[in-house]
Amino acid sequence: MMTKRHTGAGLFAAVMLMLTGCGDSGSSSAPEVSSAAEFEYTGLQVDAAEGVDPECAECIRSYFLSLETRDYDAYQKTIYPPYRENCSEYFKKLGSSPEESFEGMCSKFDEDGYESWKLTKLTLSYYGDEKASVEEFFMRFLNDGVFDEKFAEKAKADAKEMHDVIFSLDAIYAGDSQPVTVVPRSGILAIKNADGWFVFG
């Protein structure tokens, strides 16, 4: 059994930090392995802190499951629609596409020597100083040219709720007896409007 995850976990964490805004890099990026008895896989389980809206948690769970199953249609359903449309134009300017970006994100978990992996645990909590962290998210995307101030203001006006959600993510690789932490700590922005919960992913 391998006890470390190298390229896949590190690259995926880097991509998530770039694409989803605020995160806390204070904890180690080295994957952690439990020494408990043989692990029994029961699907992606969610451990949400008190106060996290269950529907918000389910939206984020669906987002990550779409990466595991490489289901682009399911992924699209979790993304905030105006952001999804805006990103299509942004990727065109880069000579890429949302589909290519999605495939790249999915492959970030892949590891040499392992045929497959499954996500096992998703831990969620709201960021402490949410107003500041949400503003930082928007400023980062404005500075990177992902969207403009008009888009940002419309998104804020559309939102019934908006949260910078801190998450960690565990996965188990085929042939291993225990899951490992592939994303120790990062952030993703979740928005609730009249149609439900979505993410900027």
Image: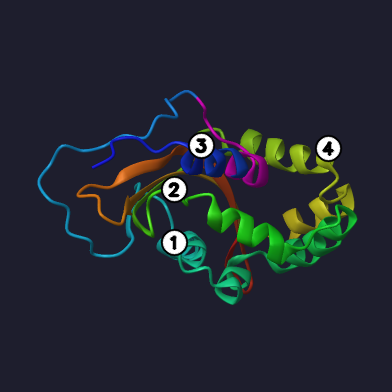
Amino acid type of the residue that numbered disc 4 sits on in the rendered structure: Asn
Mark toward the viewer: 2 or 3: 2
Where does the magenta region start and end? 16-25
Mark sitting earlier along the chain (1/3): 3
Query: How far, Cα to Cα, is label 1 from label 4?
Result: 29 Å
Whether residue 13 is situated above or below residue 73 in the rendered picture? above
**Local SS, label 3:** helix
Q: Find disc 4 in the rendering and name its residue.
A: 143
| Image side of residue 185 versus residue 152, left or right | left
Q: Is residue 155 above or below residue 139?
A: below
Q: Quadrant of residue 34?
A: top left
Q: Nearer the viewer, mark 4 or mark 3?
A: 3
Q: Tell me the tag on residue 61.
A: 1
The quarter of the displayed image where residue 93 is located: bottom right
Q: Which residue is mark 2?
A: 111
Kind of residue sitting beneath label 3: Gly
